[in-house]
Amino acid sequence: MSELNNHSLRITKQRQIILDELCSVTSHPTADVLYQMVRKRLPKISLGTVYRNLEIMSECGIIQKLDIGGTQKRFDGSAHVHYHVRCNQCGRVDDLDLPPDFNVEKAAGKLTSFKILRHRLEFTGTCPECQS
């Protein structure tokens, strides 16, 4: 429960279970998939409650909301800055163990009048399963 405490976010049983389930996988699930996972522990939880809590936790910086390929957002239990790679065929999303390049933010700041806050970088390709 410490992750929620660290962000001054009220800890609820539902919120903690949603976070626990999200952090238990590396698959970057959609809210719908996470809802099915959470329902095994909280059968009466609503999809709206899952969506609402994911939005709150992403706004607080506890988790990441990934706005990448496809119509549904995906969620990442790891809030630290890191890159992702997405399969163009099946939609699989993996973390990419590549250090973030913060120099690109400095360069972007010099080329625009924007105050650059952060950047996102997504790689696309074909996962090993789809290559077979």
Image (tube, helix red, strand yellow):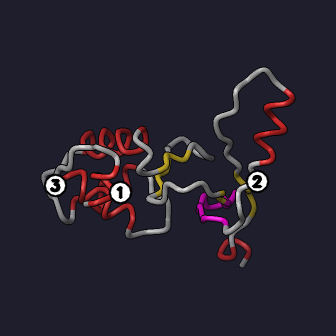
Q: Earlier in the sequence, mark 1 or mark 3?
A: 3
Check disc 1: other Cα within 10 Å, few if <14, some if 14-19, many if 20+.
many
Q: CA distance from mark 1 to mark 3?
A: 16 Å
Q: Earlier in the sequence, mark 2 or mark 3?
A: 3
User: What x and y, as percent, mark residue 62?
Assistant: 41, 50
User: What x and y, as percent, mark residue 97?
Assistant: 67, 69
Question: SS of the residue at dot 2?
Answer: loop
The residue under label 3 is 13
Q: Residue at x 49, y 68 (%)?
A: 26
Q: Magenta segment, which residues?
A: 85-96
Q: Quadrant of residue 89?
A: bottom right
Q: Earlier in the sequence, mark 1 or mark 2?
A: 1
The residue under label 1 is 34
Question: Amino acid under label 1?
Answer: Leu
Task: Tell me if residue 43 comes above or below residue 116 in the rendering.
Answer: below
The residue under label 2 is 101
Quadrant housing the C terminus: bottom right
User: What x and y, as percent, mark residue 91?
Assistant: 60, 58
Work out whether residue 49 or residue 8 is closer to the camera in this orientation and state it: 8
